[in-house]
Amino acid sequence: MIGLKDGKHRLFQHDAEASAVVSQMLLDIERHGMDAIRRYSLQFDDWSPASFELSSSEIARAIGETDLQVVADTRYCQENVRRFAAAQLATLLPLETEIRPGVVLGHRHIPVERVGSYVPGGRYPMFGSAQMSVIPAKVAGVRSVVACTPPVRGLGYFPATIHALHEAGADRIFILGGVPALAMMAFGIEDVEPVDMLCGAGNRFVAEAKRQLYGRCGIDLLAGPTEIMVLADDTADPALVACDLLGQAEHDPHSGVCLIAHSEGWARAAVAELEKQLAVLPTREIAAVAWEQGGIVQVAASCDEAIQLANDYAPEHLELHVAAERESYFLERLTNYGSLFIGEETTVAYGDKTIGTNHILPTSRAARYTGGLWVGKFLKTCTYQRCTREASVEIAKVCERQCRAERMLAHAETARIRIERYGGEGFAQITASRHK
């Protein structure tokens, strides 16, 4: 492996500053409720309306202010997300099986009841994020989805975001950002019931708030700055690869941008093309910092080394630009990624906005142990068991011995009493004499 550019590897690092700030805010909000929320909203967003929740008439007005082409395109995108979520749900079947005569085990997939969805604003009005959390929750069967999105300075809200949230199926919409939004949903303040799960992307303070609130409620995953890796052989188009790398670099100055190539000459051509495109990119002020600080370019000696490098990096987004006959080889061996985009025809932006897969994905190498947000995240897979009397005796005999071996005598008694009750008179007499 040859390293042509060594940026920061995207490892999760504890953010002491964010941790301290968020901890203090959460304690304050838990103690002082809406008064603290209003104070922080005014401090950080210059926003303190009579009510943070939008009324039905305000939602209708926002929808009316949304460009008709945006309305049509949002419908297209949301339908893709809804269809894919429904197809995923169809794979999650209930189970019941008789593992031994009279011993029946099973599971059910039960939706959580209340979800809090956070849709970020900040540098870009990412209204497309609305469907990524609300639609899978609703397809899963979640009864109530409360959505929060930060205010736009001087405007109050971004109409397309409100339209997207409404069309996705959010039951209540609040114009409230950052830590106060997550705290309101998790704690349950005033007439907002505490949610069972928080989901959605956000800045480092939002991510830290989710981390600290985990346990009080569930969360989808912890996600930091976005990442892209492109794995390319010499058949790839350097201009197209460079374009896709910059497409993610514009997200955030801390974005991770990684290229794994198969030859040094091709890699240098791709870097030169990236620098050329970066010079005229309208968002180069952000993308240039991401490329300078987080850009990584490596040249793998073989396909297997390229796969090893990709699996070690475990990127949020992984694009595969290789010859068609090699695609299946890579697909079968790549194991650590948030979402995989196969072939030059499929770019990360499709997943971010339109194609139907979810864009809330693991970063900072979390793809080693989790996938992204999907319909299954909103379901609890709960087991159950049932025995006949005859089976209960069989199970109880082993259970009693196991419990006594572990010296858990009260546990053993729960098994013994069933042996006595269901094992017949003869067994009951033997048991009684043994315990005299």
Image (cartoon, grey):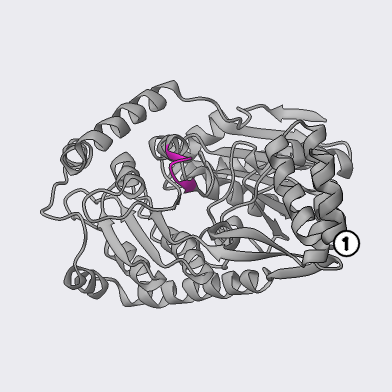
Instruction: Confirm whether the magenta stretch covers residue 199.
Output: no
Decide if residue 150 is in sight here. Answer: yes
- Horizontally, residue 126 falls left or right of residue 254, namely left
Kindly report the secondary structure that dominates the magenta region of the rendered protein: loop
Please tell me which residue is depicted at 60% across the width and 71% down the height of the picture: 84
Q: Position of residue 108 (x, y in %)?
A: 63, 66
**Magenta residues (range):** 213-218
Q: Position of residue 129 (x, y in %)?
A: 44, 58
Q: Residues within 10 Å of mark 1 (few under 14, many from 20)?
A: few
Q: Amino acid at mark 1?
A: Glu
Decide if residue 323 is in sight here. Answer: no
- Horizontally, residue 192 falls left or right of residue 203, namely left
Q: Is residue 84 above or below residue 161?
A: below
Near-viewer residue (402 or 34): 402
Q: Quadrant of residue 44?
A: top left
Q: Is residue 294 above or below residue 166?
A: above
Q: Which residue is mark 1?
A: 325
Please tell me which residue is depicted at 25% across the width and 48% down the height of the picture: 189
Instruction: Confirm whether the magenta stretch covers residue 217.
Output: yes
